[in-house]
Amino acid sequence: MLTVDGSHLEGGGQILRLAVALSAISTTPVTVTRIRQNRDKPGLAPQHIAAVRAVAGACDAECTGLSLRSNQITFTPGRLRRADLEIDPGTAGSTPLILQAWLPVALHAGGSIMVTGGTEVVWSPTIDYLDRVLAPVLRRAGASIEIEVLERGYYPQGGGRVRVRVEPARPDPIAIPEEEPGCGIVSCSAGLPGHVVERQAAAARALLESDLGLSCTPTLDPREGGASTGSSITVWSGAKGAVALGKRGLPAEKVGRAAARNLIEECRSPGTVDVHLADQLLVYLACYGGEYSTHTLSMHAKTARHLLLEFGYEIRCRENDIVEFSA
């Protein structure tokens, strides 16, 4: 039984999600202690319980300690299997973060998952970032990943629904193409006038064209119904992306420009992937090999490397003017 200190380094939900994913992939039982010890509300939140249950469903794991605010769990994986799951944390918890835990496990045996919650929430990638930035890197390596957004969900009501299907695969090593990438924009909303997504997209597009010379054709996704109200925008160029969320009183143009400015900063920085994708890809680098680079060694990346090493996966990291990861 491997014991993982859940308060180490980044000390948040990332350690828990990655620990149970690696436990399932490597068939190594794990105890995670001091979960989110340094957070304002330490221990398990509904979103974290949902992520563990998603991984458990893909490997018939036995779990103890899965209760609200619990600071310790044990996770004993069984055999990886193809499973069709439905996961609902009962809150606006981040569906992309739940999927981050499930996806590397599901790629080994295939399966599907329906996740309910928040599709665009703070401190999380949007579901469009998952589909348009992370997933394309894995698809190019040979993974079969289909992401369908049935309903958008925003804080605090949530109610978003996402269906993801994967086929079992043994992807090639992770590699980022050197050719000039395209540019994309997804501007979306729920329960708001249609002009909101138009204004978000127009502002982002104008800034990306003027500052980077990128010609982007926006995808607009206004939803009339649903349980929640809100807006968001995801922009990307190749394997670099950025997101921004709307909020009451914030003009749509400011939301669009915020996402565009973040992407411009990433594109002007060295490296083949953005700083957030860099840590999200590490588990796939460990499983399949490959290489990529970014501009900053983030705390999330340090945490992922440390945890991967505890499970026996060594990620090489060279840090000079650029941060290079390889395995």
Image: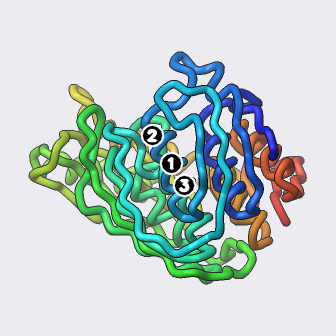
Q: Residue at x 54, y 64 (%)?
A: 58
Work out which quarter of the rendered image holds the C terminus and state it.
bottom right
Residue 92: give x, y in percent of width and height: 33, 38
As drawn, 2 above or below 237: above
What residue is shown with label 3? Answer: 100
Q: Left or right: 316 with respect to 17?
A: right
Q: Residue furthest top?
A: 40
User: Is disc 1 in contact with disc 3, using a CB cutoff of under 8 Å?
Assistant: yes
Residue 105 at what x, y percent from top left?
A: 61, 65
Horizontal relation, residue 256 to residue 137: left or right: left
- Does 296 appear above or below 151? above
- Name the side, left or right, on which 227 lies relative to 241: left
| 165 on left or right of 179 | left
Pointer 2: residues within 10 angstroms few (<14), some, or many (20+)? many
**x then y, percent, for residue 203:** 31, 48
Tag 2 residue: 47
Q: Residue at x 60, y 56 (%)?
A: 61
